[in-house]
Amino acid sequence: MSEHHSAAYVRSAMLPEQAPPVSEIGVIRWLRENLFSGPLNTFLTLAGSFILYFLVKEYYPWLRHSVWHAGSVGECRDIVTATWGEGATGACWAIIRDRWNMFMFGFYPREHYWRPTLALGLLIFAAAPVLFAESRSIRMVVLGIVAAFLLVAFPGLGVGAAANLMLAAALAAMLVVAWSRPWGLLWLTGIYPGLAVWMLWGGSVWGPVLAMSGFVLGWAAWLATRRFGTILSVGAAVLVPVAWWLFGVEQVLPLFDAVLPYSIDAVRSEKFGGFVLALTIGVAGIVLSLPIGVVLALARRSDMLLVKALAVGFIEFIRGVPLISLLFVASLLLNYFLPPGTNFDIILRVIIMVTLFAAAYIAEVVRGGLAALPRGQFEAADSLGLDYWKAQRLIVLPQALKISIPGIVSTFIGMFKDTTLVVFVGLLDPLKGITDSVRASFEWKGAYWEPYIFVGCIFFIFNFSMSRYSMYLERRLKRDHR
Amino acid sequence: MKKSVFFGTLTAAGLVAGFAAAGTLDDVKARGELNCGVNTGLVGFAAPDANGNWSGFDVAICKAVAAAVLGDPNKVKYVPTSGQTRFTALASGEVDVLARNSTWTFLRDNDLKLDFVGVNYYDGQGFMVPKALGVSSAKELDGATICIQTGTTTELNLADFFKANNMTYQPIAIDSNAEGEQQYLAGACDAYTTDASGLAATRAAFASPGDHIILPEIISKEPLGPAVRHGDNQWGDIVRWTLNALIAAEEYGVTSANLEELSKGSANPEIDRLLGTAGDLGPMLGLDNLWAKRAIAAGGNYGEIFAATIGESTPIALARGLNAQWTQGGLLYTPPFR
Amino acid sequence: MAFVSEPPRQGFRLSQLLYDTRYRSMTIQVVVLMMFMAVAAWLVDNTINNLADRGKDFNFSFLGVRSGYDIGQRLIAYDSDSTHARAMLVGLLNTLLVSFLGCIVATLIGVFVGVLRLSKNWLVSRLMTLYVEIFRNIPLLLWILIIFAAFTEIAPLPNAFKEGGGASLLLFDSVAITNRYTAVPDPLFSRSLGNIDIGIFLISADLLAIVAAVAAGWYVNRLVLRRATVVQNATGVRPVTWWKTLALWTLPGILTLAALGFHLGLPTLKGFNFTGGINVTNSLMALWLALSLYTGAFIAEIVRAGVMAVSHGQTEAAYALGLRPGRTMSLVILPQALRVIIPPLISQFLNLTKNSSLAIATGYLDLRGTLGGITLNQTGRELETVLLMMLIYLVLSLMISGAMNVYNASVKLKER
């Protein structure tokens, strides 16, 4: 390198900064990099644009010509023709407007609409310690939205101002608890199953209370017998509640009803329909299947050959047959398998089969969680001298269940989608049962697309938000775990 | 209810041991409610409205039986059954009576262990085609594509009919009447086949019913009637004679309008026996003497029910045809009440 | 584990069954077994009592009885005089048919979408994400209903294909989508070998010949490749084999087709309907399409995860070794990605097969439609038909997951 800059071809002054080439800045650069970076990409972009254009061109006019106020499909068509000219087509959303209640609640009594609504709202509160324990901001945002929704919806559902005020106070108290501690609402999680059953089906408050008290009895039995060894205490903790449910509750229930009668209007299962039915079956299925699934997963990993074989057999059987055949078992065969004369309603039978179905899938999810746990955890539990149940309860399950939560949410999404199949055993699911029933009326014959699109949108909103949240949770849990 | 929801599974074993032995009548009385199996939704025969209240021709039978047995036509729990689940629902005791346009056949009566107690609608399988197809007889349907509801007797009849006439066809199986309508209207099939009453009900709801014709051939006998479990004769008799009472009431001119007046006493001893003013018929069934009066009061006599649900003044617009009284040239002929 | 000295010998006490770890698991297993047997016996006893109550029995003789109904879509000869057993077989084959077709198309869609989702093209990756999210989050039943309705509502009537009718055939006048069926070309053989009767149904000898020829070509190709590897190991230079492979893959099939006189029978409109081709009912088309699109969305996610699971370092390492991009893909990336992709892929195939039972919504008569539908209804034997149907589905599933386990074992990382 020369030190002299006198040579003519050596520049002595810096050139002024030049503007970057047009193709490297702003929109054009973005377009070039993201859409037209090569022949293949250009082709893909053009193809994608064409598809988009085609979709918009075909369906946008139909959406733009939507009719919201009409009494029948014919009226809708007339309005579309009158407004947009002969030959125009338009969506007739008036059907949704007219039958909104049916899509949401089925035939649930109108004056009690607030009960399933509140049950759904409380479900999110009850799920908070499990699902939203990780982040306070998310927890507060979700719960806040739910509380606001309930308060806004309730006057519309015919709930009086005083009741609404009380509800507002209760919700505010729960929000404060949820804000202070992630596990603050665990008591609600505990009583929620009984509470939800009472809200949905109504009747005497003592039925659910006494049924839930079985768990307390089991706990008490476990405490009382634990000094005799794990096996005995576990046995007692299982047998006492079962005995209570089978024989005790029936005897005691009339007594409580006589002494302290408190009940709300009973609503029978056949009134359930639409999204109330789908959510009832989906949530009941998941909640009931969780304990069964955990036991199955533990059994499948057990050293005991027979226990393992039974668990594997059950799981593979359930996973090997279509859900629809299990629903047929619920509607056609369950009556064969139970003592002669036994009869309980089809929704309960469906919930039983859906629970078994979900249990097999949950078992696989939990098994995945157990397998993901480092071996060191098991060995550490062993080296501390913990017995099997203590090790599971204190060391293994809390960690394994935590990393299984996203999988459990995915299972729930799958099940929620599958609840639409109950139409094939004669229940009014929102997708086909309610839709067919609405279309059977003279006014709404011939409205094919609108109900499907509407129901599809609702399912999409539910499932998409849940799946996104579960993905977020998965990322977060993974990071925590490392 | 709540109790069965809650403890149904848990107490299944203990709860019901004693139940099965008792007769259906005692069960219904103890329950205070009649479980009635109906169609999942066929306008005119059984369909819920937007509030879940059921109405229709078959529903009227349920109401009449409930009124006769329990004294209140509204004490009915309607259990929607599909073509697949209906007989199981009855056999398993889920429903006490099945009033769901089911065809009375030998096989069902004997092999499926049901008892059909009578016929409330004489039907037959027919075909509906668009006028534009230019077909005037079912014999011209060779090679046609035909929409058919699965799980019914109609698919057997259809196969037999085309075989007997040496014709071929392409069946399109569909799951519900709603879907059949959609397929047919979109032109996915040339013809739609089901019971003639169902065709009329379906056609009535079209935007332009005049563009479709129901072909004259009726290819089967479809006596539709309520069914009960085999083996409980008392219960079977109650349902049978409730149906007969409705038919007889029309024959004798007892209507919901003159019911009260006639039950004070009439010139016709048969009416007196029917309405419980004379004789002692009710206790022979295990009911009281006013059972038939209540059944008729529930929705009127057979003719009134027919006119209100599926008759010519309704959108379904079915003529009485075979379902007229024998005195009018129809097939309805009840045994005497004596 | 520390060495535990032998406890002092003493007589066996009953409490040892509970407190002695040597016997405890045995005790638990015996108790579990007894409980299981008790429950099973209870169920069987109830069933026997219920059957007796209703005057029914449990036997499968109804399978030999004339079925009396017709099936629109069938792969083997069947009419209303055939038995219920044969109807069941027709249904089973229909289930297998739609599952097989669905698996193929779902895989194609899944791979296509999964790869495009990773594309750097903003528009395309967004479109693919939209597709995946929409299909994954909405019930399959809705897709089946919508697609079925779209076929009947949007596709033209067959006679719209007449001159001036406004509709035209696709793919060089060979495919016609109508609102009743989709007419596709029929493969015909002018020098056909006829059919082989294997007792239950006929199998086309032409098909067998083609399969045999292709299989033979594949086998010879494997020998060629193995020899090339031997040569490579000995000399360090791999002989060029691609043209042999190409020939062995294509020629046997083409030659056999030519020898059999293969030609396509094109659908033509005669009267109101298409003849000359195969008319595939729309219930099958809609079900197939819906299953493929729905499962395809799940497979796309699996493929994406599989490709992303192979770390970039693997590619760089392969380049550092001097492998060309093609070889890098086939020798380094794909084997690793496939190990991640295949197990969930097969469980998606399993799901698709089970979901094909939703054929109920389109009236496609699959196993559930025949055995668990019309046969159940006409004979009233719900116990037998539903149990048999579940057994068949179970066997199908076990066969598929058995295949998965064999594959998993073969590609499992050999850990040392």
Image (cartoon, rainbow, N blue to C red):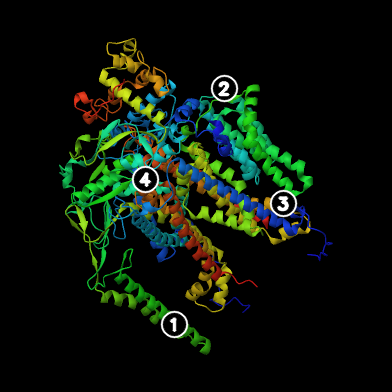
Residue at 17% across, 42% down: B132
The amino acid marked with disc number 2 is Ala
Please tell me if label 3 and label 4 are on a single chain: no
Asked if the residue under mark 4 is in contact with the one under mark 3, i.e. CB atoms within 8 Å, the reply is no
Q: Nearer the viewer, residue A104 or A172?
A: A104
- Mark 4 — on which chain does it sit? C
Which residue has dot 3 on it? Answer: A389
Indicate the position of residue A105 as horizontal and vertical percent values: 47, 33
State which chain disc 3 sits on.
A
The reply to whether callout 3 and callout 1 are in contact (CB within 8 Å) is no
Q: Are marks 3 and 2 in contact (CB under 8 Å)?
A: no
Q: Which mark is residue C223?
A: 1
Q: Residue furthest right?
A: C8
**Element at label 4:** helix
Q: Give the Cα separation between the discs numbered 2 and 4.
A: 54 Å
Chain to which the residue tagged by mark 2 belongs: A
Viewer-closest of C346 and A341 = A341
Amino acid identity at mark 4: Asn
The alpha-carbon separation of the residues under discs 3 and 4 comes to 49 Å
Q: Which residue is mark 4?
A: C377
Q: Residue at x 62, y 79 (%)?
A: A2
Query: Which is more foreground, mark 4 or mark 1?
Result: 4
Alpha-carbon distance for marks 3 and 2?
Answer: 50 Å
- Can residue B153 be seen here? The reply is yes
**Mark nearer the viewer, 3 or 1:** 3
**Pointer 1 chain:** C
Q: Residues within 10 Å of mark 1 (few under 14, many from 20)?
A: few
